[in-house]
Amino acid sequence: ILKSNDNCQIILFTSKEFATYFRDLPVSIFLPNVDNKEIMYSRVLCYNSLIQNKTLKGTIVFIDSDCVVLKNFHSLPNKMDFCIGLTYRFSPALMPINEAVIIVNSDDPRSKDFFAHYIATYQAIKNDAILKGIYQIDLGKWRGGQLSINAISPGIRHINALDSNDYIRLLPSEEYNYSAKHLNLNTLQKELISEDQLEEILKSKWILHLKGKSKNNMKKIINGIERLG
């Protein structure tokens, strides 16, 4: 992150135990009071608190911890004229909006409205008997954040970039939340993709999301990232 965004502040939301691994790195540690039984709900609650209290200013990028940031996000909201940037994907088995990457222009007062809507929706659905019956899981612990952010996003039935509204910009995951599984992991493991080819793939990406088994190819992927300079 520091290599691609040299003037940014990195804040890690974590537990006291996990924070010890980062004590020698230029990372600010935030230890929120989290209910482990409602970990995903606690995350959205934390995001909302930061935005409502204006704890952070300027461009904020909320990302999962398995995301690699490849480009500088500082001026993106102003250049693309949005308050909230969300990434969308096409997959029949998955919800279109993925909450792993949320880009926020916190100087825009509408950011408070978005996150208030986000957490209020989560509060409404996490104990909903019908949804609990459908998913058979605790929505506060898993899935509820995805349901909530999709519920408040525009154009959700036939989603693409044209469905963006006057302050929420829908950005393609192919560029802004790129799944490493698209790199064809079996091919990578057989070393049929050269580092030059991997470098070319990554040039147009803003964030690389290392999902699932892609973490098994970390060394090769990181080498490709290092070659980008």
Image (cartoon, rainbow, N blue to C red):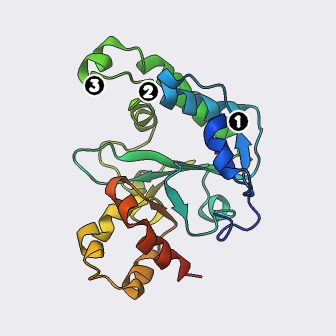
Horizontal side of 114 relative to 144 (left or right) equals: right
User: Residue 183, relative to residue 26: is it above or below?
Assistant: below
Horizontal side of 18 relative to 94 (left or right) equals: right
Identify the element where label 2 is drawn: loop
- Residue 27: x and y in percent read 72, 53
The image quadrant that residue 2 belongs to is: bottom right
Residue matched to label 1: 50
Query: Which badge, 3 or 2, is on the more N-terminal residue?
Result: 3
Query: Which badge, 3 or 1, is on the more N-terminal residue?
Result: 1
Can you say which quadrant of the picture contains the C terminus? bottom right
Callout 2, which amino acid? Lys
**Mark 3 neighbour density, 10 Å: few (under 14) some (14–19) many (20 or more):** few
- Taking the spot 53% from the left edge, 62% from the top edge, the residue there is 68
**Mark 1 neighbour density, 10 Å: few (under 14) some (14–19) many (20 or more):** some
Closer to the eye: label 1 or 2: 2
The image quadrant that residue 141 belongs to is: top left
Residue 135's disc number: 3
Can you say which quadrant of the picture contains the N terminus? bottom right
